[in-house]
Each structure stands twice: as structure tokens, then as C-alpha cells.
Amino acid sequence: MASMRAVVQVARSASVHVDGERLGGFDSPGIVVLVGVTHSDTAADADRLAEKIWQLRIMDDERSASDVDAPLLVVSQFTLYAELNKGRRPSWSAAAPRPVSEPLVEAFIAALRQRGATVETGQFGADMQVSLINDGPRTLIVEV
């Protein structure tokens, strides 16, 4: 069964823009989180994902974002649920629709903030331009 998932990247800096306007980002070491939601995900999944990512020991010296108070940039990304089994055109049927996914992305962000994280975000459903300088590179796929 599919579950809430994220692509997590340690970055030296990152930003997200919509229509040329910077909505969020950071200029010191932090974590970029691209988060996707599927139909069966719940607020409890969002909370577990937030805890896991906040405590992941992926920063320098095997420390977590919580250990070093690293900022996070969270960007919703339904394409994490692309189905590529047939042909060359992805199907998005495994991605939850906006009425399901938007509140869960917001719950994920709120759960991070409740843990003390500094969280910047993009704009749900917008055409966003995300820039980052991946450090390492350190990129993980996290599911709960």
C-alpha cells in the first residue's frame, strides 16, 4: 500500500519562486522537502513523516535538523506519485486530489513547526520554480 512520501535533500541554500516572487527559502544549511500525498494518507501519517524528517541524522557530523536547528523548505509535489507502468505518459491517479492533499501538506508543515522547526513553503498547486544547492549530494526518499 502506498504511503505519504517525501524527497529530502540537504542543501546549502534553497528558494522557491512563483511568478518571479520569492515565497520562501534559506541561505544557510538546511533541508528541502518535496512532499507527496496519496489517497489513503492521514494526519497521523503527516505527523509521523514530520517527526522522521526532523530527526533524520543527515546533516554534517551525523546530526539531525533538530540538533542544528536547520531550516526546512517544504514544497508540495504530486508528481511523486507518478505511475509509469504503461507507456511513456505518467498517470497521476495515485496522487490525492487537492481537497485531500492540501490539508495533509499543511498538517505536515504544522507538525514540523510544533517541533520547533523553521519552515518556509511554496504555494500549493502553483507553478513553482525551486532552486537549491544540494550538499553532498545527500538525497533520500522517505515514506511512512
Image (cartoon, grey):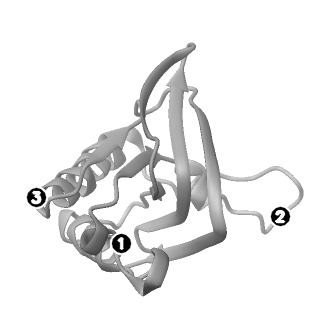
Identify which amino acid the numbered label 2 is placed on.
Answer: Lys
Q: Which mark is residue 53?
A: 1
- Mark 3–mark 1 contact, CB under 8 Å? no
Q: Position of residue 56 (x, y in %)?
A: 38, 80
In the rendered image, the quadrant that contains the C terminus is: bottom left
Choose between 13 and 54: the one closer to the eye.
13
Residue 10 located left or right of residue 101: right
Residue 5 located left or right of residue 120: right
Q: Earlier in the sequence, mark 2 or mark 3?
A: 2
Q: Determine crowd level at label 3: few under 14, some 14-19, many 20+ residues with C-alpha closer than 10 A.
A: few
Cα separation, mark 3 vs mark 1, equals 13 Å
Q: Nearer the viewer, mark 2 or mark 3?
A: 3
Q: Earlier in the sequence, mark 3 or mark 1?
A: 1
Choose between 76 and 67: the one closer to the eye.
67
Cα separation, mark 1 vs mark 2, equals 32 Å
Identify which amino acid the numbered label 1 is placed on.
Answer: Ile
Which residue of the protein is positioned furthest toward the right in this rendering? 87
Tell me which residue sits at (48%, 76%) in the image. Answer: 60
Identify which amino acid the numbered label 3 is placed on.
Answer: Gln
Secondary structure found at label 2: loop
Q: Quadrant of residue 131?
A: top right
Q: Determine crowd level at label 2: few under 14, some 14-19, many 20+ residues with C-alpha closer than 10 A.
A: few
Tell me which residue sits at (10%, 58%) in the image. Answer: 114
Tell me which residue sits at (25%, 70%) in the image. Answer: 66
Q: Which mark is residue 114?
A: 3
Q: Earlier in the sequence, mark 1 or mark 2?
A: 1
Q: Which residue is mark 2?
A: 86
